[in-house]
Each structure stands twice: as C-alpha cells, then as structure tokens.
Amino acid sequence: MSKKIFITATGTDIGKTFVTALIVKKLKESGYNGGYYKAALSGAEITENGLIPGDACYVKRIANINENTDNLVSYVYKEAVSPHLAAQIEGNPVEMKKVVEDFNNASSKYDYLVMEGSGGIVCPIRYDHKKIMLEDIIKELGLSTLIIADAGIGTINHVAITVEYLKIRNISIKGIILNNYNENNMLHKDNKKMIEAITKIPVIATVKENEKDLNISIKKLLGVFE
C-alpha cells in the first residue's frame, strides 16, 4: 500500500501547486517513487488540442513525473472558478466514485502519493442535487493534510481558521509549510512563531520565493505521509 498526503491551502493563489511540485520533486530526487493526483482543476488553458490542466502540467514538469497528464487529474474545467460552478457552466460534474477509482489507480503506481486540493479547504466541488465539499473527498479517501500558507501579513488568522475548520471535522493535520518566506523578514519570522504557538501545529518547512528545492530533510518529509 502506498503512503499518501493531501495538500490544502489557506486560500487561492497561495502557492499550493508550487510547493506541491517541490514536495514530489524532493521525493523523486531522493530516490522515492513519488506521484501526484488532483480530483478537480479549474481555469485550464484552452488550446486547439483541448484543455491543458496547468497545475498538473507544472507539477509533472518540475517533478519530472513520467505519467500521462490525463491520469493526474480526474476533472478539468476551463472556467477559473470553483469546481462546483465550473461544472454548472460546463457540465461534467464531479462524481465521488470516479475520484476514488482514479485515486486508487494512482496509489497503485506510487509508493508516495501527493494529492493536491482545489483552492482553500472550504471549496465546493459539486453543489447541485449532489453536494461534495473538498472535506468530503479527504474523508472518503482517509487522508491527512498538509497546509500551505503564505508567510506574509494576515497569515496567522488564515492558518488558525483553516486549522480549526479541519480539527472540527476530525481531519488530521500533519504540518504547515510557509511559502514566500524570507528568513530576514521580522514579520515572517514572527508569523511562523505565532502560528505554531496558537495552532500547536508544526511549521515543517519554509519556502523562499522562486525556490528550486524544498528545504526539509527527506526523513522529515516522509514522516507526514500515512
């Protein structure tokens, strides 16, 4: 059985995909069979060859994943909105059964599977006669989470709210990673300290802007997978 982790964030455009790519890259460059999967992706690029799932393509390129892109994402939408709204506009709403099947297929190929969420933790994936929130997928797949947050102003509040939301729903949190972190910035350093003090969740790594590698030991990284 492969080990897995679910990557969520405190909001959209936090750098979740960027950090996810560095995680998978670290696994593979350390000699581990690491893979990637995402249930639903919105805001895909439209080309003459169809929709291009940018997030998945980015992770595939940075982490050098030898996999057909179609196997990395179950649902791809062109509208840059929440998956539930994109599906209402375009059709093809998310079915939990397909997500589970595709996730299990990915799990069978990799020893360590990184699943990336959509947007922040409160993300409607489907909202018609069926209702699927992001948390429903996490619970259905039995995953623990890793939270990606920006290191800048406002992040204490955003992280604390995300942590409380997950705790109330009995979803395990394995750690926090701060993106766009500057070790010489007093605010960033204090944010890291305060986040750990308030949430009691460890910041397992910090990522500089445009970082090429994840600054964490492979042993510590492997420890977040279950």
Image (spheres, grey):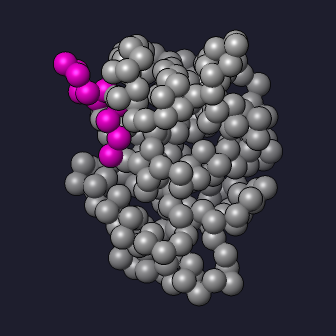
Q: Residue at x 26, y 27 (%)?
A: 127
Where's residue 143, x and y in %?
Answer: 41, 40
**137 up-or-down from 21: above or below:** above
Q: Position of residue 165 (x, y in %)?
A: 28, 55
Q: Judge from the rendering whether residue 72 lies leftward or rightward of residue 32; answer left or right.
A: left
Quadrant for residue 133, please give it: top left
Looking at the image, the residue that sits furthest to the left is 129
Rendered residue at 49%/34% (across/down): 80
Which residue shows up at 44% across the image and 53% down it?
A: 11
Tell me if 4 is positioned left or right of 143 in this view: right
Is 139 situated left or right of 35 in this image?
Answer: left
Residue 63: horizontal and vertical position, in percent? Answer: 75, 39
Taking the image as shown, residue 25 lies to the left or right of residue 44, namely right
Identified at 40% across, 13% down, the residue is 92
The image quarter in which residue 134 lies: top left
Q: Is residue 94 above or below residue 193?
A: above
Q: Which residues are magenta?
A: 122-132
Q: Is residue 146 visible?
A: no
Q: Position of residue 194 (x, y in %)?
A: 43, 80
Q: Is residue 126 magenta?
A: yes
> Which quarter shows the N terminus?
top right
